[in-house]
Image: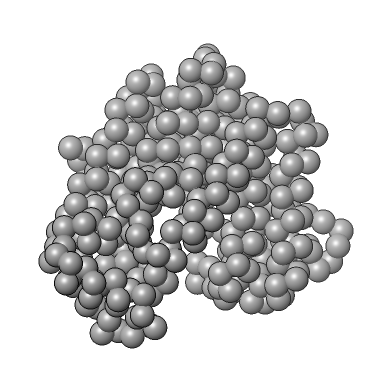
Amino acid sequence: MPPKSTFSLDQIQAPIAAEMEEFEHKFRQSMRTRVLLLDKIMGYIVKRKGKQIRPMFVFFTAHISQPVPSERLPEASFRGAALIELLHTATLVHDDVVDESNYRRGFFSINALWKNKIAVLVGDYLLSRGLLLALQHEDYELLKIVSNAVRELSEGELLQIEKARRLDITEDVYFEIIRQKTASLIASCCAVGAASAGADKETIERARLFGEKVGIAFQIKDDLFDYGTAEIGKPVGIDIKEKKMTLPLIHALSQAGWLDKRRVIFNVKNNEGRRDRVQDVIDFVKKSGGLDYAIAVMKRYRDEALAILHTFPESASRTSLEQLINYTIEREK
């Protein structure tokens, strides 16, 4: 098993620090508009950016995939990272409208500050900026990769909504949902990184599969946060309150007798935010070994991702990618 990561995100990012700084400047420029209201909203979006994990995956994967190693990445890598950020941000803005969510990463959502109509139009604008960025530079391969990811994100969301009504999600369906909803985006980051660096089709597919396995491990980690004992970016029990069937709960139910299963499903369906019902589900999952099972599956996907990563030439970027995976799997928030 890989050693526990003791590196900070800044240390991990060190080999691509110059690219990340340059990207931030270029991304800010790409968001500018002469429409005053829109420019104000774009500035707000840029200001509340997260850890920027997605651009990191693009740049690291571009470095390890280059047919001829170079200190300088091609401009296509920066455009690819911007394309992913623009299209992904658009989907998040639209998601907040669909979910009627007033917060994202501790900040007010766009729809909370400027209402739904403007939020939908902002999401449309971000989508169009991403499309134009790719088309203006004839980055057709990058556009194809990212557009496919956006399609999968939408399909995954709809599949989850469809299945959530009956709470009868199996492990197979769960993995299909998270492959589309979460893993497809990380997979597209890695595929875009490889494609932007001029890699061949086999290398691009290897990078994509690596990202997919990382994305699945990331999502299982996020599932586990729902059973924590502290506020860690999302409230404990929020998935249960929202009637989302995650891996720990799915496994625990598969091992339960019909009386326990009936009680737990009732509490999920009818929790109405009640702490006692949510806590009953959490306690049941813990006692049934749901957490241990999910942790084991998460580590398996992490190890499969690392095995693919190690087929790439050894380099500082490859080492940082390994550290980034372990950092994310071991994170406490």
Residue toward you, 211 or 164: 164
Left or right position of 34 against 18:
right
| Image point (29%, 33%), residue name | 304
Residue toward you, 203 or 77: 203
| Image point (16%, 63%), residue name | 256
Left or right position of 189 against 130:
left
Left or right position of 156 against 30:
left
Residue 296 position in % (x across, y down): 20, 47
Residue 322 position in % (x across, y down): 33, 36
Left or right position of 293 against 7:
left
Which corner quadrant holds the N terminus? top left
Task: Please say if 229 is above or below 328.
Answer: below
Residue toward you, 64 or 160: 160
Which corner quadrant holds the C terminus? bottom left
Quarter location, residue 18: top right
Quarter location, residue 232: bottom left
Asked if residue 97 can be seen in this view, the reply is yes
